[in-house]
Image: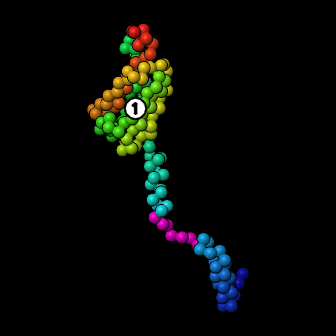
Amino acid sequence: MRGLDAKEQAEMIEQMKKMNEEMGDDFLPTPQTSTPQAKKPSVAKAHELKVAEFTLERDDNEGLLQLAVSVPGLDSMKGVELDVTDSLASIVFPSSVKLKPLKVELPASVVPSSVKAKFSKKTSQITVKLPLLLKVAKAG
């Protein structure tokens, strides 16, 4: 295989310039702009969210379900949203603790209006006491 002489090199350069003009600026690699870089951290944050660790126990002596949720980094109940229906407990955490919202299907019907929640700073844990519907009905 032989090298290109000066005339062939000049023709190739001209062909490349012509191709570049025809294809436009989209053909050439473009430097990174701030817009894609600004989007990357927000996508990464979504992947950084973790699933909260929890336990759900039934206490038939007390007539309730007890939901204990570990929330490292939480200082108080400020910003925590708790929503309870007769069959589902949902907790939304402040963004600072980087936890996904938690939804727990309850194995028995509870009385949403009698639910009590407390936060322990010492253990960084939210404890939700969910009175069972049958126990309340029997007591009443």
Residue 46 magenta: no
- Say which residue appears at 28% left-offset and 33% top-offset: 121
Q: Secondary structure at mark 1?
A: strand
Nearer to us in this view, 111 or 20: 111
The answer to whether residue 106 is seen in the rendering is: no
Which quarter of the rendering shows the C terminus? Answer: top left
Give 132 or 26, whichever is nearer the viewer: 132
Tell me how the rendering is colored. rainbow
Spot occupied by residue 127 in the image (x, y as percentages of width and height)? 35, 27
The residue under the point 39% across, 22% down is 113
Q: List x then y, in percent, for residue 131.
A: 40, 18
The foreground one among 24 and 51 is: 24
Q: Quadrant of residue 56?
A: top left
Amino acid at the residue labelled 1: Leu
In the displayed structure image, the side of residue 11 where residue 44 appears, left or right: left
103 lies left or right of 3: left
Q: Main secondary structure of the magenta part?
A: loop
Image quadrant assignment for residue 53: top left
The residue wearing badge 1 is: 82
The residue positioned farthest toward the left in the image shown: 122
Q: Is residue 33 above or below residue 76?
A: below
Q: Quadrant of residue 59?
A: top left
How dense is the environment of label 1, judged by Cα within 10 Å: few (below 14), some, or many (20 and up)?
some
* 89 w.r.t. 26: above or below: above
Q: Residue at x 44, y 54 (%)?
A: 41
Q: Which residues are magenta?
A: 28-34
Seen as rendered, the residue at the extreme right is 1
